[in-house]
Image: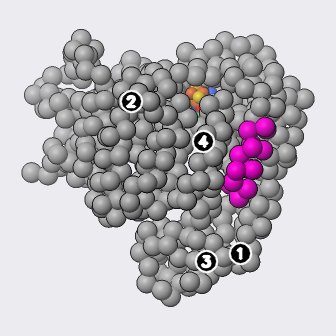
């Protein structure tokens, strides 16, 4: 008999991909994924702990599910992802109605855990057994467990393919090295096979995923020798059917000229690059343990733009890092105005458990962090708007992602969202159309199909 599975996913694309893997795994056990929690037999919360706010959301959602559990004692409630990995004990203590807590590298053991749970074994006993029997290299097992991807209808025309996991960079503020473990690269053959299956099912856009894709193959435990990220990119780009190729995320210190050259030479590699800088102040970058300077970052951006002048650059910024003074913050604003990123994700610094910066003195007040964040975001909005206006009048290639009534939504090569109201043509997700851009806002473009 089939059972209903509802997964709520927080956090980054790694988590989104993990949720898909979980769906695939549990489909083999008779679970059907549903879009709503009502009527679910199993609810999984795939969690993120990157910032305090993300973690608070998890605890409040878990709390709000308590009455559901009381109403329906057969309902199973599980927590996966980064909070589960780091704060398993705390979840167990604060949320006794949670049945399962599964760390990031153990999701492939979910079917076995559910099985044991149904035999009456408690979740604490399962967790203890798991630790005792932990012998298989988890990542290898995890990534190769579900070779047959979801049907395209369920997932659209673009998909993520994980190429590496974990992070060895230990930025002083970041939980990821703790929640995802050491960098581990996947075998080329497995990556190629997964992409081939996806395109054979009609997927047209592939995004290669990792916390730090630029170091793919260099700190490998699993990947083949003699391969690095630019070579992998060329290989994947060459797979027939891959219309658009993207990747995320990159650490600036590992961005090489060989990779920049890919943007000039690989036709289907999209001119879109997420290169998190975090701060425009060398003093702050040093305390963040980022291992590059503002000068080397800017030099890389300049060179990248020589290889690919139309590249759309995105970044991540943290404001209010401990000890960030007004001059440091101004340096971040100067960097924004110099690079003029197409878009950015900006965050208020937040202390995280087991990170070095949590111990740093000279914390910035919440009020001042708010002020800096809004100053930064206002300027970014203005720049995004100006950048978007540069497209007005141009004809650009758009991949259709959704069609609702006659309104089409899609993305440009640079990853800008485009809306085309009143599109008469019958189009489906994955179709490529040429669009004349007629208007721009700070977050999207508006246009008209003009094939
Ligand atoms: N691996 C990616 C980033 C993953 S986390 C990279 O290095 O590019 C995504 C973003 O969250 C980071 O780039 C950073 O800007 C932000 N972030 C991470 N830890 C944070 C913290 N403690 N407080 C605020 N923002 C944080
Ligand atoms: Fe976190 Fe730094 Fe690793 Fe990115 S590179 S995941 S910010 S430790
Ligand atoms: Fe969050 Fe974990 Fe991703 S902490 S950002 S879900 S790696």
- Labels 3 and 2 touching (C-beta < 8 A): no
| Point 77% across, 68% down: residue | 389
Report the span colored magenta. 298-311
In the image, 328: left or right of 287?
right
* Image coordinates for residue 313, horizontal then vertical, percent: 69, 50
Mark 1 Cα-neighbour bin, 10 Å: few <14, some 14–19, many ≥20: few
Eye-nearest disc, 3 or 2? 2
Q: Which residue is mark 1?
A: 394
The structure residue drawn at horizontal position 43% and vertical position 25%, both measured from the top left corner, is 220
Query: Could you tell whether 361 is left or right of 121 in the image?
Result: right
**SS of the residue under disc 1:** loop
Q: Nearer the viewer, mark 4 or mark 3?
A: 4
Q: Residue at x 80, y 55 (%)?
A: 383
**Magenta span contains residue 301:** yes
Q: How busy is the neighbourhood of tag 4: few (under 14 within 10 Å), some, or many (20 plus)?
A: some
**Label 3 or label 2, whichever comes before in sequence order:** 2
Residue that numbered label 2 is attached to: 223
Q: Are marks 1 and 3 in contact (CB under 8 Å)?
A: no
**Up-down relation of residue 342 to residue 230 (above or below):** below
Q: Earlier in the sequence, mark 2 or mark 1?
A: 2
Asked if the residue at tag 1 contacts the one at tag 2, i.e. Cβ–Cβ closer than 8 Å, the answer is no
**308 with respect to 338 (left or right):** left
Q: Point out the residue furthest to the bottom here.
A: 424
Q: Nearer the viewer, mark 1 or mark 4?
A: 4
Q: Residue at x 46, y 62 (%)?
A: 243
Q: Which mark is residue 435?
A: 3
Please say whether residue 62 is one of the residues in the magenta stretch.
no
Q: Earlier in the sequence, mark 1 or mark 3?
A: 1
Q: Quadrant of residue 223?
A: top left
Q: Residue 92 appears at what percent x and percent y?
A: 35, 22
Residue at which label 4 appears:
259
The label number, if any, that marks residue 38 in the structure image: none
């Amino acid at each position: 008999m089939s059972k209903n599975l509802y997964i709520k996913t927080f956090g980054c694309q790694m988590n989104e991909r993990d949720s898909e893997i979980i769906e695939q795994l549990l489909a083999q056990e008779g679970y059907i994924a549903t879009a709503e929690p009502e009527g679910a037999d199993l609810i999984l919360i795939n969690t993120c702990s990157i910032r305090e706010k993300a973690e608070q959301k998890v605890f409040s959602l878990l709390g709000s599910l308590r009455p559901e559990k009381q109403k329906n004692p057969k309902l199973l409630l599980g927590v996966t992802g980064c909070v589960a990995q780091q704060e398993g004990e705390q979840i167990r203590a604060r949320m006794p109605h949670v049945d399962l807590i599964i760390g990031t590298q153990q999701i492939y053991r979910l079917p076995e855990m559910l099985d044991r749970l149904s035999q009456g074994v408690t979740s604490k006993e399962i967790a203890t057994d798991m630790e005792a029997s932990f012998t298989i290299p988890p990542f290898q097992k995890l990534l190769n467990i579900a070779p047959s991807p979801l049907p395209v209808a369920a997932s659209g025309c673009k998909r993520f393919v994980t190429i590496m996991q974990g992070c060895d960079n230990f930025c002083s503020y970041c939980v990821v090295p703790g929640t995802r473990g050491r960098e581990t690269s996947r075998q080329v053959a497995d990556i190629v096979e997964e992409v081939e299956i996806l395109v054979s099912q009609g997927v047209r856009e592939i995004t290669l995923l990792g916390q730090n894709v630029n170091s793919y193959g260099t700190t490998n435990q699993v990947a083949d020798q003699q391969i690095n990220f630019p070579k992998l990119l060329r290989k994947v780009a060459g797979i027939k059917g891959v219309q658009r190729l993207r990747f995320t995320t990159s650490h600036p210190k590992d961005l090489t000229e060989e990779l920049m050259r890919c943007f000039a030479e690989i036709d289907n590699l999209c001119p879109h690059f997420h290169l998190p800088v975090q701060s425009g102040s060398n003093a702050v970058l040093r305390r963040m343990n980022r291992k590059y300077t503002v000068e080397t970052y800017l030099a890389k951006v300049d060179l990248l733009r020589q290889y690919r002048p139309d590249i759309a650059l995105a970044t991540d910024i943290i404001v209010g890092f401990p000890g960030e003074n007004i001059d440091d913050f101004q340096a971040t604003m100067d960097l924004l105005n110099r690079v003029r990123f197409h878009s950015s994700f900006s965050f208020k610094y937040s202390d995280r458990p087991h990170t070095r910066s949590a111990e740093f003195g000279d914390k910035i007040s919440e009020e001042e962090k708010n002020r800096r964040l809004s100053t930064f975001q206002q300027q970014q909005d203005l720049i995004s708007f100006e950048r978007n206006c540069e497209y007005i009048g141009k004809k650009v290639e758009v991949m259709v992602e959704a069609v609702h009534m006659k309104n089409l939504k899609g993305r440009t090569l640079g990853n800008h969202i485009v809306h085309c109201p009143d599109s008469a043509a019958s189009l489906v997700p994955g179709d490529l159309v040429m669009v004349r851009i007629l208007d721009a806002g700070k977050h999207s473009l508006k246009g008209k199909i003009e094939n």
